[in-house]
Image (cartoon, helix red, strand yellow):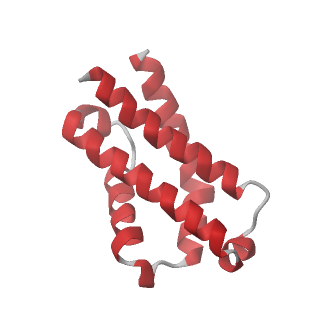
Amino acid sequence: MQLEVKKHLSDALSAVERVERFAKGKSLDDYRTDDLLRAAVERQFVTIGEALVRLRDRSPATLSRITHHRRIIRFRNIVVHGYDVLAHETVWDILSQHVPVLRAELVGLLGELG
């Protein structure tokens, strides 16, 4: 069970790192106009959300230590099912304001699990 928990946390962290790498040096305007950047970032948000869904099934206690886990999972569902209502500004705000916090929480949890 602990191996699966670590895997889901690691999968989420890897996706966070990819989002950060893809967006490095980019602006909101770049995000608006670059189809490939948008597709890459959105795909990683799906992975992050899905990893947390699977973590919820394995270790709700661990998931509860991720500050905005419910919002992250809901956002994953919007990216997947609500593509037509997804605002570029919302994605960029999440990327720039909330992803660094999530990264720190994931690193901390993985550190505790060894």
Residue at image point 24% right, 42% down: 56
Front residue of 32 and 90: 32
Residue farthest along the bottom direction in this orientation: 84
Residue at image point 42% right, 18% down: 112
Q: Horizontal and vertical percent for residue 73?
A: 33, 56
Q: Is residue 82 left or right of residue 55?
A: right
The quadrant in which residue 77 appears is bottom left
Q: Horizontal and vertical percent for residue 93?
A: 58, 65
Q: Confirm whether residue 13 shows in the render.
A: yes
Q: Confirm whether residue 64 shows in the render.
A: no
| For residue 25, above or below residue 36 | above
Question: What is the quadrant of the C terminus in the image?
Answer: top left
Q: Is residue 97 left or right of residue 57?
A: right
Residue farthest along the top direction in this orientation: 114
Q: Horizontal and vertical percent for residue 43?
A: 49, 60
Number of numbered discs on residues: 0
Q: Horizontal and vertical percent for residue 72?
A: 39, 56
Front residue of 4 and 75: 4
The quadrant in which residue 25 appears is bottom right
Q: Is residue 18 left or right of residue 11?
A: right
Residue farthest along the right direction in this orientation: 25
Question: What is the quadrant of the N terminus in the image?
Answer: top left
